[in-house]
Image: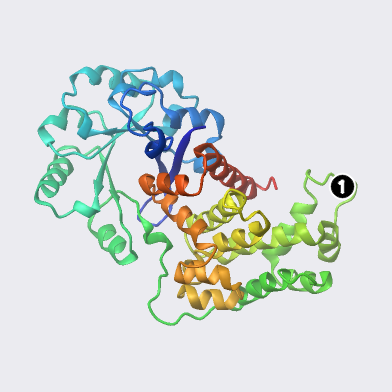
Amino acid sequence: MDLLIVPVPLFNENIAVEAYYFRNRKGNDLLDGTGTSILDGAMLSLPLEMLRLVSMEALTMGKPIFVPVTKYMLLSNLETQSRQPADKIIFLIDAGEIEDATPYLAKIEHLRSLGYRFGIQKISDIDRTEPLLEKCDFVFYDHRVFDHMNEVKIRITITHKYKHITSVYTHINNMDLFKELRGRYKGLFEGHFYRTPLTKGKHEVSPLQVNLINLLNKVRDESFEFDEIADIIQRDPMLTVSLLRLVNSAYFALKEKVKSINQAVVMLGQTEIRKWITTAVARLLGAERPDEVTRLALIRARFAEGLAIKFGMAGEAQSLFLMGLFSVLDAILDMPIDAALDMVRVSEPIREALVEHTGKYSTVFQFILEYEAANWNVVSRLLILNDLETEDIYQAYVNAMIWYSDIISGDS
């Protein structure tokens, strides 16, 4: 699909994901103009088309998703484009492109009668937007303009007049700011705050984390011993249960159940046990942080691996996987990134990319960061510079999300 898309998490006050919203762009607008063409596919929602091809579980872990819609889409057959339960889809309107709400109100009311909900963003004129607000369940506020006089007036008016509307505060990019807003306002919150280290001082790594890191370092040794790996796994009940469940799953279709860790490790072999340990350890290390941190780490890892051949690094896919996995290790271990990387003894190219943003892997890492941030103009430029196709990037990212969903559901 000729689509650049990323689902962005929205958190409640307890830093649990309540929903996602799509940031997307069609094609590479710097190359062919499709990103800004007003009438090109104007009635078709590509995110809804994507949801027909990829499961909600893979994209949003079954959570509701905000789908951006244009004024042209509002007049189209959105209900027939969607194949998802209506309560999982929230159509997100851009108030800035609707000068007169009248032509759209009947269609919005019809979609609401079917169970769909609506959100609205980029409100600049409260009077002009009021007819839409009456039919919306969510309103988005961009924290970057939070203190502008007009924004404050709009926010106060909506809060007092429309009690049914849930506020969504975006671009909250540090934990202190999140805590401040959480104390002052009710609603949902978006931003990078959830993936920043919690402490500002020295943090002691727990014995369990030390054991997991030791296992991760051991398994990356090309000549590791199965008995040694099995011994470390047996020290952690969660790893033990997870490994036995994997080898006794329908995927292996064994006649008799495997009952020992040593037997399980030998049966999987070096390649598979290394892959399983890498992903399992990442999940357990991040157990005390928001689930989205682990999801981010694993999707980045698989995305980076999928991009390896596209960036001319096919032989270094595993290293790029580790780069993506360790890119949020500071948030997982709650310490500066350089100290966290010291614990897992990464290679110099990975350290250069994650700490100094230099070296041969930095191009892939920077591309991933820009993609996640939906900086589509930058992404488009990088696509051209690296001779990449939008379809290839779309497929690599979707594959990463499907892979993560399979891991969580126990299918792989």
Q: Nearer the viewer, residue 268 or 164?
A: 268
Q: Nearer the viewer, residue 385 or 295?
A: 385
Residue at 57% over, 69% down = 349
Residue at 53% over, 71% down = 351
Provide residue 369's location: percent of width, then percent of height: 44, 55
Q: Which residue is mark 1?
A: 254
- Tell me if I can see residue 332 in this picture: no
Q: Is residue 396 left or right of residue 247?
A: left
Provide residue 305's location: percent of width, then percent of height: 61, 53
- Tell me if I can see residue 79 in this picture: yes
Q: Relative to 30, does residue 362 appear above or below in the rendering?
A: below
Q: Quadrant of residue 66?
A: top left
Residue at 51% over, 45% down = 387
Provide residue 241's location: percent of width, then percent of height: 72, 59
Which residue is farthest right?
Answer: 255
Q: Quadrant of residue 67?
A: top left
Colour scheme of the rendered structure: rainbow
The total number of labels drawn is 1
Q: Is residue 229 left or right of residue 302?
A: right
Q: Nearer the viewer, residue 344 or 183?
A: 344
Q: Relative to 70, does residue 22 appear above or below in the rendering?
A: below
Q: What SS does tag 1 mark?
A: loop
Provide residue 101's location: percent of width, then percent of height: 19, 24
Q: Is residue 267 left or right of residue 82?
A: right
Q: Amino acid at mark 1?
A: Leu
Residue at 37% over, 39% down = 30
Q: Residues within 10 Å of mark 1 (few under 14, many from 20)?
A: few
